[in-house]
């Protein structure tokens, strides 16, 4: 009996260790950037005038896209794709927050963002900052943007990075989605992060 109890004392902890195994590793279709040492936070004003940081969306998967409302192609296409992703997620879409961050605060006023962003999905939020705040956020997220002069002073366009960052429910950056990815691939990756 004493021998049995000694063996049990040795085997029981080993059996319990087996119970603590992590689940199957995630297999993303987009670029896994887990552990990145930038893209950690922001402080910008939303389309309703409320100051926002990443912590405001804890408990949700956050998709963050940099663009501008007068963008002729990439921005509206990306926003339409994200709208399709939300449709594909069904009820799970309520656990996802899409953020559109303008790189053109000069023209993209709070009112303009309020008209533009919810047209794609009423849950989407537009974010803006001053020129200095925009520059700081772009630096933190390593996002390139630059004004390209047009024929008139107010008809300029903006060259900018066209990818998206995705954060998990705890607010950690997990994915970078390059421009042109199929909505199905984005939906699949978000579903994995939603668990």
Image (tube, rainbow, N blue to C red):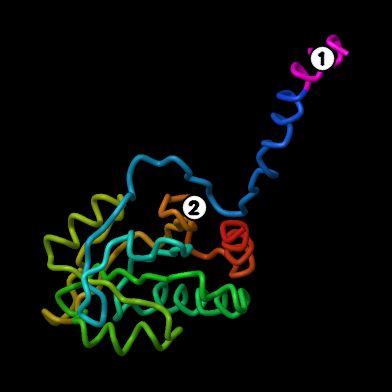
Residue sitting nearer the eye, 75 or 175: 175
Q: Residue at x 21, y 79 (%)?
A: 108
Left or right, 96 with respect to 182, comes to left
In magenta, the rendered stretch is 1-11
The picture places residue 63, in percent across and down from the top left corner, at 44, 64
Q: On the image, numbered disc 2 is attached to which residue? A: 175
Q: Main secondary structure of the magenta part?
A: helix
- The quadrant of the image that shows the C terminus is bottom right
Asked if the magenta segment contains residue 167, the reply would be no
The picture places residue 17, in percent across and down from the top left corner, at 69, 29
- Dot 1: within a 10 Å radius of its alpha carbon, few (fewer than 14), some, or many (20 or more) residues? few
User: Which dot marks residue 82?
Assistant: none
Q: Residue at x 47, y 53 (%)?
A: 176
The quadrant where residue 151 appears: bottom left
In this view, 88 is above or below 60: below
Residue sitting nearer the eye, 55 or 187: 55
**Image marks 2 and 1: residues in contact by CB distance under 8 Å:** no
The quadrant where residue 171 appears: bottom left
Instruction: Pick whichever of labels 2 and 1 is earlier in the sequence.
Output: 1
In this view, 160 is above or below 24: below
Q: On the image, numbered disc 1 is attached to which residue? A: 7
Residue sitting nearer the eye, 38 or 170: 170
Q: Please identify the residue farthest to the front as the structure is shown.
A: 1
């Amino acid at each position: 009996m004493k021998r049995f109890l000694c063996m049990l004392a040795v085997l029981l902890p080993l059996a319990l260790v087996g119970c603590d195994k992590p689940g199957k590793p995630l297999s993303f279709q987009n670029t896994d950037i887990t552990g990145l040492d930038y893209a950690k936070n922001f402080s910008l004003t939303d389309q309703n005038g409320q100051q926002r940081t990443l912590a405001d969306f804890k408990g949700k998967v956050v998709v963050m896209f940099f663009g501008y409302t007068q963008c002729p192609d990439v921005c509206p296409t990306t926003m339409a794709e994200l709208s399709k992703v939300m449709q594909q997620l069904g009820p799970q879409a309520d656990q996802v927050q899409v953020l559109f961050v303008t790189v053109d605060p000069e023209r993209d006023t709070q009112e303009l963002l309020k008209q533009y962003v919810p047209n794609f999905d009423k849950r989407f939020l537009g974010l803006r900052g001053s020129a200095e705040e925009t520059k700081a956020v772009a630096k933190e997220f390593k996002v390139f943007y630059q004004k390209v002069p047009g024929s008139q002073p107010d008809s300029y366009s903006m060259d900018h990075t066209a990818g998206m960052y995705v954060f998990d429910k705890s607010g950690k950056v997990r994915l970078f989605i390059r421009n042109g990815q199929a909505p199905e691939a984005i939906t699949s990756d978000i579903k994995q992060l939603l668990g």
